[in-house]
Image: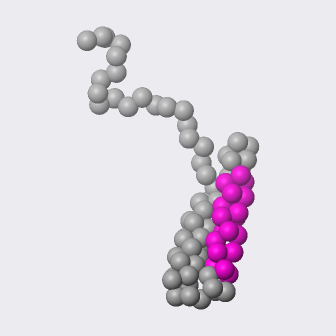
Amino acid sequence: MQENAPEEGDAQPGPAQPQMPLGIVIARILVVTSMSFAAAAAIFFLVGGLWLLALLSIAATAIFLGLMFVIERGAGSSVRHS
């Protein structure tokens, strides 16, 4: 065994992970949860034959998907500038 090799129990300190702001974490959770509820409602309304409500739910899903991309872009820029 090599003398300088780390033992199995030793943890090597890696590069520091940047901290994500709490607001972005909460926004991610809310957007993903809302998008999943909107998509589930769209499926429910499609199965039930309620086409207009299904279209509204699909539109809400698309809006939440767009918000998720905006939040991710904002999260990436806030972490780089910190």
Q: Is residue 11 above or below residue 34?
A: above
Q: Is residue 45 left or right of residue 2?
A: right
The quarter in which the N terminus is drawn is top left
Q: Is residue 7 visible?
A: yes
Q: Residue at x 59, y 70 (%)?
A: 35
Q: Residue 18's x, y, as percent?
A: 60, 43
In the rendered structure, does residue 67 fall within the stretch colored magenta? yes
Q: Is residue 41 visible?
A: no
Towards the viewer: 67 or 53: 53
In the rendered structure, does residue 46 fall within the stretch colored magenta? no
The image quadrant of residue 6 is top left
Which residue occupies the extreme top position in the image?
2
Q: Residue at x 49, y 31 (%)?
A: 14
Q: Is the magenta region chiefly helix, strand or loop?
A: helix
Q: Is residue 27 above or below residue 57?
A: above
Q: Residue at x 57, y 73 (%)?
A: 39
Q: Is residue 4 above or below residue 31?
A: above
Towards the viewer: 45 or 78: 45
Q: Residue at x 62, y 82 (%)?
A: 54
Q: Which residues are magenta?
A: 55-74
Q: Residue 36's x, y, as percent?
A: 54, 71
Q: Residue 2's x, y, as percent?
A: 30, 10
Q: Is residue 69 above or below residue 38?
A: above
Q: Residue 24's x, y, as percent?
A: 64, 59
Towards the viewer: 20 or 70: 70
